[in-house]
Structure formats: structure tokens, C-alpha cells
Image (tube, rainbow, N blue to C red):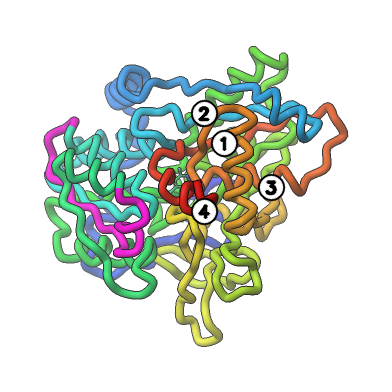
Amino acid sequence: MSKYQVDNRGYYGPFGGAYIPEMLFPNVEQLEQQYLEIMNDPSFRAEFDQLLKDYVGRPSPLYHAKRLSERYGATIFLKREDLNHTGAHKINNTIGQILLAERLGKKRIIAETGAGQHGVATATVCALKGLECVVYMGEVDIERQAPNVARMKMMGATVVPATSGSKTLKDATNEALRDWINNPLDTHYIIGSVVGPHPYPDMVARFQSIISAETKIQLLEKTGKETPDIAMACVGGGSNAAGMFYNFVDDDVRLIAVEAAGHGVDSGETAATTVLGKEGVLHGSRSILMQTEDGQVVEPYSISAGLDYPGIGPQHAWLFKSGRGEYVSATDDEAMQAGLRLTQLEGIIPAIESSHALAHLEKMTFKGDEVVVVCLSGRGDKDLDNYMKYFNL
Ligand SMILES: Cc1ncc(COP(=O)(O)O)c(C=O)c1O
């Protein structure tokens, strides 16, 4: 068993666990006792694999970005999660969780969303299965990710604005947890990242591990070796990074996670959790989060709704603390420039979240023979308005 994966008590080193109100105990306990059994069941696996193939369009390509590679002097591959149905990696997890919810006999689905990609992915699988869907979304995010709100509504979901705090992802998560506490019997909460009480971080990471499982096969085919020198991804809660790292944590691969620095790590307007955070409990698990001296959560900021979160999942806290992973950050400006650069070098408009991972390439030095895989977690359609405004286009 890898020391970087969850242990049998639900912990990654000192991080993880299930810090939940008593009302949620039966739900979380039921999940904990059944998730592995359900996920390992051959009929579950067959339905999951078939939907990933025929509905999501997997495997997603591993694309050798030649002009990007020339710019940086390394061999750079992009794992094209942006080409998935609904436009991001989030659908891998929602397909898995809707099949799980079905087997648990749940009829009502709730979710939180920041960029709206997880909300869209949840509304999509609810339409697919004919289940009721309620998505909590911060008021600020409803405005800056309007196309995704329209998509959710068109698929029949109810989008409920979260109006407290910074009116972003943290606040939407609070509202979703509150809903679950009030409706524990018929409702399954599809958490969209590797956060929340155990077993969510492990369950979501397992559903997203398809990203690195495919990458291994594709790299072997393209380079003759199944591991890259470096695997990179952006980190909000950390699910695309967890999926990208999952099958490489015990290999000789540098793992680089890029957080959102907002206006700069010292600006007071940032979401660079590992730079500023301290250990504590957020949304049901022990991790690292941005907090005041007396433990109040600090309101985060990022131009990217999907990275605008004051914490990271417990596995990331452990990869950071143990030194196994390298945690860095990119500012709004660095990310926006990186998004435009990819668009003009490769003809691919990335989600602003993914642009953060790309931005870090500018700060790296390469010897020339490294193989780098960057997880391109989503496409930029939802962000066109933001790009247009930022660049005065
Ligand atoms: C395209 C995209 N990438 C990344 C993220 C960040 O989430 P995570 O860190 O869980 O991958 C989001 C969140 O909404 C997203 O939409």
C-alpha cells in the first residue's frame, strides 16, 4: 500500500478523516462501508467503463504540443480532458457517483459548483438517469460563469445561489452540506473534488485516476516509456491533479501542483493555500486551509472560479507536507497570458483553471530531454467572456 494513498482509517498521514455533524453519520458511514465493494463490482465497472467510452468519449487524447514544446525546450504532452463531453474532467467523477447513488437507492442529487463544470457534469448525469438535481453555486460565480448556469438549467437542474461569505465555491459547499444534513435519507451529495469527509477524497481520486491510467498507456505508445519526468496540474480542491498523480505517486516522477495566487500571494486577494494555509478542518476533513489566527476561514480570491477555494484536499496536504509533491502558484495575470499563449501556439482555448498549470511552464528550466505531461483539465468556452474582457478583444 502506498504511503501517499488513504489508509484504512481514512487518513493521508495526519490529514483526512470525517469531521461531520451527527445527522450525516448514517450517510457517510453507508458510503464508507459500501464504496469499495460497489466500485469493485464487475457490473458497476462494466457500466462505468462503457459510459466513459461511449458517452464521455474516453480515452481522451494525449497530445504532443509541438510549438509549446519548442518554446520551453522540453517534450510537452497535454492530457486533453477538455475534449470530454461537457468540457472538463469533472464528468469522470459524476458518472462514477451517479452509478453509486443508483446502487444506494438515492433519488435526489445535490452538488456544489464553482466554475460550473462540476454543476454541469452533475446536471448531465442526472438527466441521463432521470434524477432530481439541485446545484448550489455562489452568486459571484453564477455571474462570471453564466453559460454553465444556462446549461444546468436547460438540463432540468435547479441552481440555488449561495449568498454568504465571498459568494463563491466555499459558500456553495456550505449550502450543499446544509441541504444534505436536512435531507439525509433520499439524497446523495456528489462532491466535485477530492475534498469532504472520508471516503470522498479517495472515491473521487479513484474515479479521476483514469486520467493517469490512460496517460501511462499513451506515453508508452508515444515515447516507449510509461512514466513522464514531470506531471503537472492545477489545484482547486485538487481532483484533476489527484487523477493525474494517482498512478505516478510511487514512481520517479516529479509531481507539480499549481494553485491560484490571485493578485499575488501577499496581496490579500489570493487562493494560494499551501503558501498561506495552516492545518485545520474544512468541509469535513483535516487538511491545510487559509485561516485567521483564531481559525476563521479567510475568504479566497482568484479570477478562476474553479480555483477560488481556501483549502485543498487532504491527499494534497499530505503530498505537500511530506515533500513528495511540489506546490507552486500562478497569478491571475500569469494564467491569463498562458491561456492566450496556448490558444495562439496550439489553437486550443483552455479553461482559466487549466491556464494556471500552463503558466508555471514559464518559470521552469529544462535540460531539453524531459517529458512533461500537463493535465488540460477543461476547455475555455465558459471563460470566453472573461478572456475577451481581460484582453479587450
Ligand atoms: C476546468 C477545471 N479545472 C480545474 C478545476 C479545479 O478543480 P479540481 O482541483 O478539483 O480539479 C475546475 C473546477 O471547477 C474546473 O472546472
Indicate if the residue with disc 2 has its beta carbon within 8 Å of ligand 1. Answer: no
The relative height of residue 366 versus residue 198 in the rendered view (above or below) is above
Task: Categorize mark 1 by other alpha carbons within 10 Å: few (<14), some (14-19), many (20+).
Answer: many
Res 165 label: none
Q: Earlier in the sequence, mark 1 or mark 3?
A: 3
Q: Earlier in the sequence, mark 4 or mark 1?
A: 1
Indicate if the residue with disc 4 has its beta carbon within 8 Å of ligand 1. Answer: no
Q: Report the residue that reaches farthest toward the front.
A: 393
Q: Amino acid at mark 2?
A: Arg
Q: Which residue shows up at 34% across the image and 33% down it?
A: 86
Q: Earlier in the sequence, mark 2 or mark 3?
A: 2
**Residue 45 appears at what percent x and percent y?**
34, 24
**Residue 160 appears at what percent x and percent y?**
20, 59
Q: Amino acid at mark 3?
A: His
Task: Categorize mark 2 by other alpha carbons within 10 Å: few (<14), some (14-19), many (20+).
Answer: many
Res 375 label: 1
Q: Which residues are magenta?
A: 128-146
Q: Quadrant of residue 206?
A: top left
- Secondary structure beneath disc 3? helix
Distance of mark 2 from mark 1, alpha carbons?
A: 7 Å
Distance of mark 1 from mark 3, alpha carbons?
A: 13 Å
* Closer mark to the observer between disc 3 and disc 4: 4
Distance of mark 3 from mark 4, alpha carbons?
A: 20 Å
Mark 1 and 3 residues: CB-CB less than 8 Å, in contact? no
Q: State the residue position of label 4.
A: 390
Q: Is residue 3 shown to the viewer in this render?
A: no
Q: State the residue position of label 2.
A: 80
- Secondary structure beneath disc 4? helix
Mark 3 and 4 residues: CB-CB less than 8 Å, in contact? no
Q: Which residue shows up at 83% across the image and 42% down it?
A: 365
Q: Report the residue that reaches farthest toward the bottom.
A: 294
